[in-house]
Amino acid sequence: MERRSFLKNGLMLGCSAAAAPLVTPVAMAAAPWDTRLVVIILRGAMDGLDVIQPYGDRDMAALRPNLPVGEAGQALDLDGFYALHPHFAALKPLYDAGEFGAVHAVSTPYRDKRSHFDGQDILEAGLPDLTGGGLRDGWLNRMLQVMPGLEADVAYAIGREQMLVLTGDAPAQRWSPDANLNISPNARALLNVVHHDDPLFRDASAEAIEIAEQIAMGEAEAEETADMMAASPMMEAVRSNGEHVRIAEFAATRLRADTRIASFSINGWDTHARQANAMRRAAGALTDTILTLKAGLGPVWEKTAILCMTEFGRTARENGSTGTDHGTGGALLYAGGALRGGQVKGSWPGLGDADLYDGRDLMPTRDVRAYAAWVMRGVTGLDATTLEQAVFPGLDMGSDPSILL
């Protein structure tokens, strides 16, 4: 077998099955309120310090000498302290219009073990830990369980993976586009081992993955261009017509109708090596998704709140592979006409040695669940006690961060 053929057919995505699931579904539910809530899980642990760069922190540049920061990396200034990674430039007009923003130094209660599987389970379950005897449902579904008179939307069931965040007793339906899978389960399991057990193998695998993805992207370019949505000027900035765009198009179609809640995931945020390359691909998928949602939702965009959440952040210091490893504190990204964008919220802890969590990670200063809870309270009218006890057990919502208009 030729090397390029082997790479294409055997090594298409990396780090672990948790970081890159085989199939990405959309989970949806209809509800009696008018505001739409979209929760996007960024699987693989997005590096919030790279996406929303605190270039105004005097310690930032020294921590990442080979990962361009601020003006040196052509990042887009947001407020004199934070800058937006250049690969997210397509979202800067939304930021300027008050329709895109971020919250920094947040995390779930998950600490120290830094496992994709456990981190994603805690994020989607909305629990403080995994000691309660198994995962039964997700926080979006528990919210639906305490809301009276809900009905499920039209059912679409294609694919394997379930979104835990919307799994539970309340009615919700699932749909996923046809997946073009270019990796066998055995190859994926192999990558899981080599990526984490030996830095040399991890770097070699990352290089092989990059080659394979370039091959696949080249073959798909003509088809993606032909299928591009051209009706809206917003779609001119969308760079592909891949699965993530089809998911966003379908979600927008349902959200314009009776559906009020949608949740899906975007993979590829695990950046152990060659972070600049991995960030380019992941950023393209997320910006494509948000712009497609805005274009597809039309006037409903003004009544839409999008929360982009990840299982944990990444180390403050870069590693020897021009990447970053699993960390703790990170960033929440949000978008939509129903949210107050044009700002970076959160209490900044600093990046000095004494400020870092465990001497290596961005220190979380607030539970990311609190921001989701405050948005849900504004959208649904649920009281704080219900949210803190039934939807997010053990959560202290704290003061209102005022990101919902």
Image (cartoon, rainbow, N blue to C red):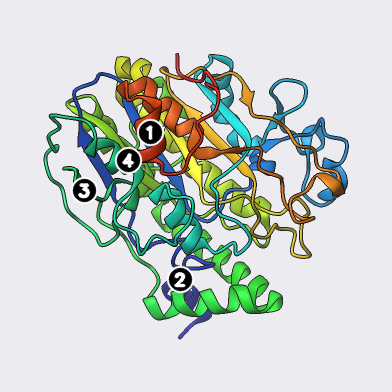
Residue highlighted by disc 2: 8
Residue drawn 56% across the image and 25% down it: 101
Q: Which mark is residue 52?
A: none
> Which residue extends farthest bottom?
1
Q: CA distance from mark 1 to mark 3?
A: 24 Å
Residue drawn 64% across the image and 39% down it: 51
- SS for tag 4? helix
Q: CA distance from mark 3 to mark 4?
A: 14 Å
- SS for tag 3? strand
Residue drawn 72% across the image and 29% down it: 82
Q: Locate the N terminus and report the quarter of the image it occupies.
A: bottom left
The answer to the question of whether label 2 and label 1 lie on touching residues, with beta carbons closer than 8 A, is: no
The answer to the question of whether label 3 and label 2 lie on touching residues, with beta carbons closer than 8 A, is: no
- The image quadrant of residue 144 is top left
The answer to the question of whether label 2 and label 4 lie on touching residues, with beta carbons closer than 8 A, is: no
Other-residue count near label 2 (Cα within 10 Å), few / some / many at <14 / 14–19 / ≥20: some
Q: Is residue 46 visible?
A: yes
Q: CA distance from mark 2 to mark 4?
A: 37 Å
Ranked by sequence position, the earlier of labels 2 and 1 is 2
Residue highlighted by disc 4: 140
Other-residue count near label 1 (Cα within 10 Å), few / some / many at <14 / 14–19 / ≥20: many
Q: Which mark is residue 174?
A: 3
